Image (cartoon, rainbow, N blue to C red):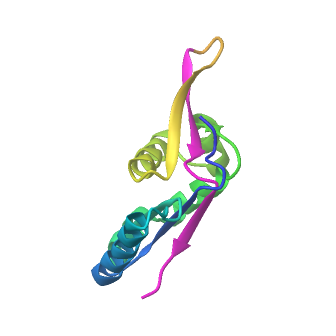
Amino acid sequence: MSLSRGRKIRIGIESMDRFFSRMRANARKLDRDERPAPGLNLSFEDPADFLEVITPARVRLLQEINQKAVPLFALAAALSRDPSAVRRDVTLLESKHLVKTRRVSNPGHDVQTVVERAAASIELAATV
């Protein structure tokens, strides 16, 4: 599993009107046999919901795995956080398609979970 080169994820706050406008524009492109811009938009209508997912600790986690896959326990150590808390954050971020995990052999120690970004670029945008 490698970092999706060129793929971009945008996380932000967006009204329902803006969301549906963007979806209509994408549908029109598809009707013309054009491809919408690649990537993923994760939109929140309520700024409070955005802030529940994008916490300072999770932003630091995303920064730590910027260009490379990192074993979960090494990630926890680098962040000076409890591994179970990092695992919870990774699980939530994976459910939002922001990170990917895989289990790899760790010679002499069974297997370990490795965490990497789901895209080369993750943009955080908040306009209130």
Viewer-nearest residue: 9 or 50: 9
Q: Is residue 118 magenta?
A: yes
Does 7 sit above or below residue 108? below
Return the residue nearer the eye: 110 or 15.
15
Overall secondary structure of the magenta section = strand
| Residue in the image at 38% along x and 48% along y | 95
Residue 119 is situated, as x and y percent measured from the top left of the image, at 58, 52
Q: Residue at x 30, y 76 (%)?
A: 20
Q: Quadrant of residue 13?
A: bottom left
Residue 91 image offset from top left, x and y in percent? 41, 44
Q: Looking at this rendering, what residue extends furthest in the right direction?
A: 67
**Quarter of the N terminus within the rendering:** top right
Q: Quadrant of the C terminus?
A: bottom left
**Observer-nearest of 54 and 14:** 14
Q: Which percent across, then down, holds residue 10?
A: 51, 67
Q: Residue at x 36, y 68 (%)?
A: 27
* Left or right: 52 as drawn, with respect to 35: left
Q: Which residues are magenta?
A: 110-128
The percent coordinates of residue 49 (x first, y second) are 33, 70
The relative height of residue 20 versus residue 76 in the rendered view (above or below) is below
